[in-house]
Amino acid sequence: MNGHRSVALALTLVAALVCALGVRMASAQEQEIPPKQRWSFAGPFGLYDPQQLQRGFKIYREVCSSCHSLKLLAFRNLADAGGPGFTEAQAATIAATFQVTAGPNDQGEMFQRPGKIADYFPPPFPNDQAARNANGGALPPDMSVLAKARSVERGFPWFIFDAFTQYQEDGPDYIHAILNGYEEPPAGFTLPPGAQYNKYFPGHAIGMPKPLSDGQVEYTDGTPTTVDQYGRDVAAFLMWAAEPKLDERKRLGFQVFVFLIVLTGLLYFTKKRVWHEVLHQS
Amino acid sequence: MSANSVYKPQHPFMQWLERRLPIASLVYSSFIVYPTPRNLNYWWTFGGILTFMLGAQMVTGIVLAMHYTPHVDLAFNSVESIMRDVNYGWLLRYLHANGAAFFFVAVYAHIARGMYYGSYKDPREVLWILGVILFLLMVVTGFMGYVLPWGQMSFWAATVITNLFSAIPGVGDPIVTWLWGGYAVGNPTLNRFYSLHYLLPFVIAGVVVLHVWALHMVGQNNPTGVEPKTEKDTVAFTPYATIKDGFFIGVFCLFFAWFVFYIPNYLGHSDNYIPANPGQTPTHIVPEWYYLPFYAILRAIPSKLLGVIALLASIVLLAFLPWLDTSRVRSANYRPLYRQFLFVFFLVVIGLGYLGSQPPEGGYVIAARILTAYYFIFLLIILPLLGLFETTKPLPNSISESVLHKGLAAGASPPSGVKV
């Protein structure tokens, strides 16, 4: 019997070894890992920081919005609970600074008018072809769910720990890293025409020119005006754009946990009571 | 524990109804006095959990369907509008998407329990086969549901999986065109997947009724694998099983809530937040985690046709377990060798799951081939032979004896007759 046991054990060992070998071979071509940032919205009680979202929105508006659309967001969302904390009047004022295509009017013509609070953020280009044409063939992605559409390959065993530590911020980490990842290409690296070298971009040749530099966007609240800070603020804003109900979700989550723990506890003691007789009779 | 007491309606209306539709006595005999072995452990609560999850998926799914638009140009944004503009839409969608994953967590635990305790053996073969059919239906339903948000992974998963049918010699390509409703995955494909995704859960519910019916014909297996012999071996379904199931559904929901409220996108793929683009293939197309072991088996085999056959065989073979396993002893507790090989089998399935998530190159392919080989060798060679050569441990005479013996051995309870 011991012989068979060792056969089974040996089989498991071989399988484990082969798996480990596979991992080794695959990790040969490694990519630079975006450094983890501190996010106010991380963890079970983490919520958005409205001040940070407002700063991030300022960066989107002054920098990103010239190429990137934000199609799924309406101006009214800026005044939603758990968001940047603008008042409805402020959101309406912001909307009025954008020109929106409306119509057709009674003559059948489309026309431009200042945005209203119910309007969605107008895209910078009328269509993808125009966007590509203006950006050297590269399409600037829509930013509505961008923070959830980008991730960092975590690999074994980290992805298992992430389930316990609730690490869900790899998207914002990646966005922050990209904005801070522009550098001179290393010797021997040939960039395709029109591309820039970015340490964190897959393949390193990114179509987007370095969008932010220190002091470019003015902050009125004394926050440092560095690319590092800009990156964090705009990534936080994009996370909110992608997951606007995060605050509500975590608040409700806590209530659900309290309820479930109490309910499960009561069920446990009821079960114990009901089964007591069965377990202690012969 | 008066297990064989019969339902006697007291109220005049219930007496009237009983003579016309004896539904009350059916419920009474099936879910109240129905005898269940007294030694069931928590692995037996997954049947209840699965029923709960099926109900939860149906409720959240029906409400989601009220807001979803099955059209290639609108589907992605309609899901986003559910997340943003529908009251608690984010909650419904996260419950439904993570609910599918937890449905599979429960079904894998349920299948593993069946394999460990030999629950498929005579007289429970039909019960088991119905279970394999349910699993297949779940796989199909889950896959079609994953396509509906119409993100990049949705689209490319649909393309890869439907293309598997093109491996069928001769009629492969016409079949794929017929499945797509066109010459590529497109709007007709999305529409029929939506229709079927709504239909199949009701088919599942129907087969669940058969599954439960078969269960009530043959009774539950138990950790000893010895059939209940006297009334002392069983307890009534209510309150004993209901309260135990209820408690464990609570525990399960705690895990479920952890994912829904705190890491709702952990089990998904970030590429599915990119709208479907037929012109751009993602670097790695990976299915949802619960299909990864089968995906690894598919890719482990160099020939497409043989790969598809292996993929199908890996699930269909499970239906033949009652005959592949030749041992007369049910529970792995009394089968030391089977137990070892089975644990290796479970590890192999987990290993295949990991390999399915990795690119099919280099060492990963070799590892996947070795693990795939073990998967089939276990089912086709080890299982039939083990039954012939294995020396099993002596079985207890009855469930009561095993319960009592266990208590005495552990020193947990005093000799019989003394109440604590």
Image (tube, coloured by chain):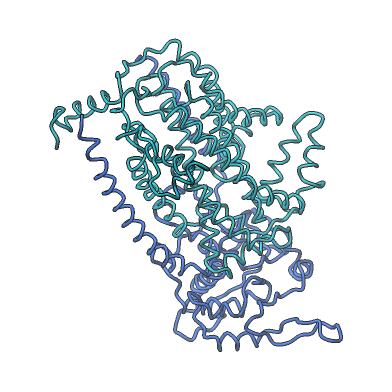
Chain colours: A blue, B cyan
In the displayed structure image, the side of residue A99 where residue B235 appears, left or right: left
- Residue drawn at x 54%, y 44% is B289
- Residue drawn at x 56%, y 33% is B363
Residue A177: x %, y % from top left:
53, 63
Q: Nearer the viewer, residue B230 or A240?
A: B230
Residue B246: x %, y % from top left:
37, 47
In the picture as drawn, the residue positioned furthest to the top comes out as B389
Q: Is residue A273 visible?
A: yes
Numbered label tally: 0
- Residue drawn at x 80%, y 42% is B177
The quadrant of the picture occupied by the N terminus of chain B is top left
Q: Nearer the viewer, residue B371 or A120?
A: A120
The quadrant of the picture occupied by the C terminus of chain B is top left
Q: Is residue A13 visible?
A: no
Residue B193: x %, y % from top left:
69, 49
Residue A15: x %, y % from top left:
48, 28
In the picture as drawn, the residue positioned furthest to the right comes out as A107
Q: Nearer the viewer, residue B210 or B251?
A: B210
Q: Is residue B269 above or below residue A105?
A: above
In the displayed structure image, the side of residue B392 where residue B146 appears, left or right: right
In the displayed structure image, the side of residue A227 where residue A72 appears, left or right: right
